[in-house]
Image (cartoon, helix red, strand yellow):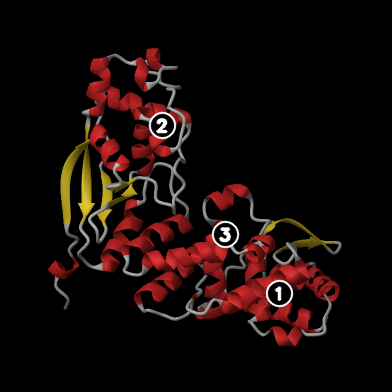
């Protein structure tokens, strides 16, 4: 049996003042705004109430950072708290306007004030306020660090499932390259065109990057689907990262698929249909059906016009058999295979 010691995470705990964190951030020694997270999920009132809590000397939960190979620290938990404090101290440090406090109810007199409006003694006291920082050392078991981040992401304004994947993948050797590839593929023009029906709030939570992952999971990991989409995508990513699966090593078919979709369907391939016209937002079950139906074999559709393909797809989407396999209760491998086969048959008959 593997020893408990081999799974231990090596950490260091220290107290950093808010002023120190600001200076380390300015010097590039702490990365406060990782590119895989939205900087602010909190409202102005939530940010202001945190500042009020600091001024009242209420305890603030610790932050967690991970040390990279160069010794630079990257914030992995506590982003909202830390970025709110930095915006208060110096908005330019996080590319924001200086925080003007609002919604504070215990210290109501501070509403409308900025950092520079306070007295020297209050400003110095705020900058010297310590917060416990737990640093995860660059050595240690990748899988344990990965699981640790997933478990840390509790409370407050939660990250989306894909944001957690993006962050936790950084705990693993090679995870940064994995995430960079997700970003690259999600920014391809034809992918963006074909998936443009994803709502903006969902894009802010990295729904486009999740669709990239879902594409490869449909192509290579359908057998792992047990009805829970989040777990399915988590397990697929873990197989790629920990088992060194080559399921995402060749992206040429991904690019060819979205070229085919954008050329023949525009933005209408993954949405519900009414009277032959697509409407509404992108539906993940429809996305899975089309991805699975085409299977990278574009030769089978040679000679078929975009008009015929689009008509065949919209027609099958409107059929009761397809709706039964993609509506409520459709999260099963059996129903996924049914809707894939229905779309494949419809497109081949176009």
What residue would you read off at disc 3? 208
Front disc: 3 or 2: 2
- Residue 299 marker: none
- Quick one: SS at disc 1? helix
Could you tell me which quadrant the C terminus lies in? bottom right
Q: What residue is drawn where x is 68% and y is 64%?
A: 194
Q: What residue is drawn where x is 46% and y is 34%?
A: 96
Of labels 2 and 1, earlier in sequence is 2
Mark 1 neighbour density, 10 Å: few (under 14) some (14–19) many (20 or more)? some
Residue found at the very far front of the displayed protein:
27
Of labels 3 and 2, earlier in sequence is 2
Q: Is residue 289 visible?
A: no
Q: Position of residue 40 (x, y in %)?
A: 45, 40
What residue would you read off at disc 2? 91
Mark 3 neighbour density, 10 Å: few (under 14) some (14–19) many (20 or more)? many
Q: Is residue 294 visible?
A: yes
Front disc: 1 or 3: 1
- Quick one: SS at disc 2? helix
Could you tell me which quadrant the N terminus lies in? bottom left
Relative placement, left or right, of 123 versus 327 is: left
What residue would you read off at disc 1? 260
């Amino acid at each position: 049996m593997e020893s408990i010691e081999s799974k231990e995470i090596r950490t260091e705990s220290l107290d950093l003042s808010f002023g120190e964190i600001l200076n380390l951030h300015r010097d590039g020694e702490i990365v406060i705004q990782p590119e895989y997270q939205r900087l602010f999920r909190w409202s102005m009132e939530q940010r202001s109430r945190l500042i009020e809590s600091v001024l009242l000397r209420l305890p603030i939960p610790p932050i967690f950072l991970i040390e990279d190979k160069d010794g630079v620290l990257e914030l992995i938990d506590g982003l909202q708290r830390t970025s709110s404090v930095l915006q208060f101290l110096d908005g330019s440090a996080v590319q924001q306007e200086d925080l003007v406090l609002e919604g504070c109810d215990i210290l109501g007199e501070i509403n409308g004030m900025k950092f520079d409006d306070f007295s020297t003694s209050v400003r110095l006291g705020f900058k010297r306020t310590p917060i416990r920082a737990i640093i995860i050392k660059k050595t240690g078991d990748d899988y344990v660090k990965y699981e640790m981040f997933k478990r840390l992401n509790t409370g407050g304004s939660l990250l989306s499932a894909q944001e957690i994947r993006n962050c936790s993948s950084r705990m693993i050797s090679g995870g940064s390259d994995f995430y960079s590839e997700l970003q690259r593929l999600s920014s391809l023009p034809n992918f963006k065109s074909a998936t443009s029906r994803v709502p903006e709030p969902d894009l802010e939570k990295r729904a486009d990057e999740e669709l990239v992952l879902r594409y490869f999971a449909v192509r290579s990991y359908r057998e792992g689907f047990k009805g829970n989409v989040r777990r399915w995508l988590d397990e697929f990513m873990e197989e790629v990262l920990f088992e060194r699966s080559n399921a995402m090593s060749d992206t040429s078919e991904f690019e060819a698929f979205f070229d085919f979709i954008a050329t023949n369907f525009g933005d209408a391939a993954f949405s519900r249909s009414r009277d032959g016209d697509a409407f509404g937002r992108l539906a993940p079950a429809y996305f899975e059906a089309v991805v699975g139906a085409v299977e990278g074999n574009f030769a089978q559709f040679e000679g078929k016009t975009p008009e015929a393909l689009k008509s065949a797809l919209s027609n099958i989407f409107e059929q009761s058999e397809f709706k039964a396999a993609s509506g409520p209760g459709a999260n099963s491998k059996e129903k996924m295979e049914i809707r894939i086969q229905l779309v494949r048959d419809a497109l081949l008959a176009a």
